[in-house]
Amino acid sequence: MTTKKEKNERKRQRYAEDPEYRAMILESNRKSRVAHREERNAKLRLRYATDPEYRAGLLLAGKGRKRNYRKEHLAIYGLTIEQYEQMLQAQGGGCFICGEPPEKNLCVDHSHDTRMVRGLLCLTCNLGLGHFKDDRRLTHAATHYLFRALREDFGARSHAMTTNPDDREQAKRMAARARHLKIKYNMTLEDEAELVRQQGGACAICGERPDELHVDHCHITGKVRSLLCLSCNCGIGFFRDDHNLTARATAYLRLAELLFEESLYEGG
């Protein structure tokens, strides 16, 4: 009868000699870590808080050890420092989208669905993609929106707010809103209501109907362009209100999709 020790020894030998078996075990372990990450971390935090010997051991092991945080961060994406430098050089030393050279390290951008690294981006372009939900349809819509804003005068309008004369707090909020619209956008509450009516209460880029829409305006001319949801308003802000950058972001996301599809084809 085979003992447990002998079974484990055979597994260790197979793990060392069979690359396919080793890859299968590593992938199974990775999936298990991801699935039980919160549970495992909670147990470790509890042990750290309640076990003085365990806590002292960790603190002692950490003393005098200089951690390479950059190396650890890149390892999350499966990259080494050398691979990061190669990617940066291949991008011309700047952000993949806007091309600007970084003051610090660029962000590693990756697909949250496939986990595939797509490129290196500056912080603002990375945040811009995030606000557009990594959806090239939204960046494409933002490109059209910004390009059209260069050619058309949208006028001063904004979204509707109802009033209740008997509600003093509501009246104060209305007055504050009216002052804000007048000072910042030179528009009235009626202008705001008319624009909401024209847009059907929806964001001019993504078409969603949030509880609150935001007045978008050109920071050069001061002209009001339309009403946007918070994500789209922040998104075009991070892309500097530049339709060229949103167009490059669209191309960037499409290229990442094509590369992923190509990797699936080669893997099959």
Image (spheres, rainbow, N blue to C red):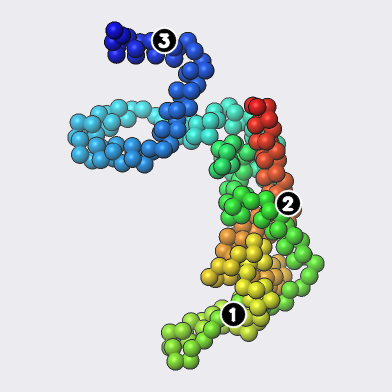
The answer to whether any part of residue 241 appears in the image is yes
The answer to whether any part of residue 158 appears in the image is no
In the depicted structure, whether residue 107 falls above or below residue 216: above
Numbered label attached to residue 122: none
Instruction: Give the amino acid at mark 2.
Output: Ala
Question: Is the residue marked by circle 3 packed among few (<14), some (14-19), or many (20+) residues within 10 Å?
Answer: few
Q: Return the residue at label 1.
A: 160
Quick one: quadrant of the N terminus?
Answer: top left
Which of 250 and 243 lies nearest the eye of the viewer? 250
Where is residue 236 drawn, in percent x and y?
Answer: 65, 59
Q: Return the residue at label 3.
A: 13
| Separation of marks 1 and 2 at Cα, in angstroms | 32 Å
> Is 78 on the left-hand or right-hand side of 259?
left
| Separation of marks 3 and 2 at Cα, in angstroms | 53 Å
Secondary element at tag 1: loop
Outermost residue, bottom side: 166
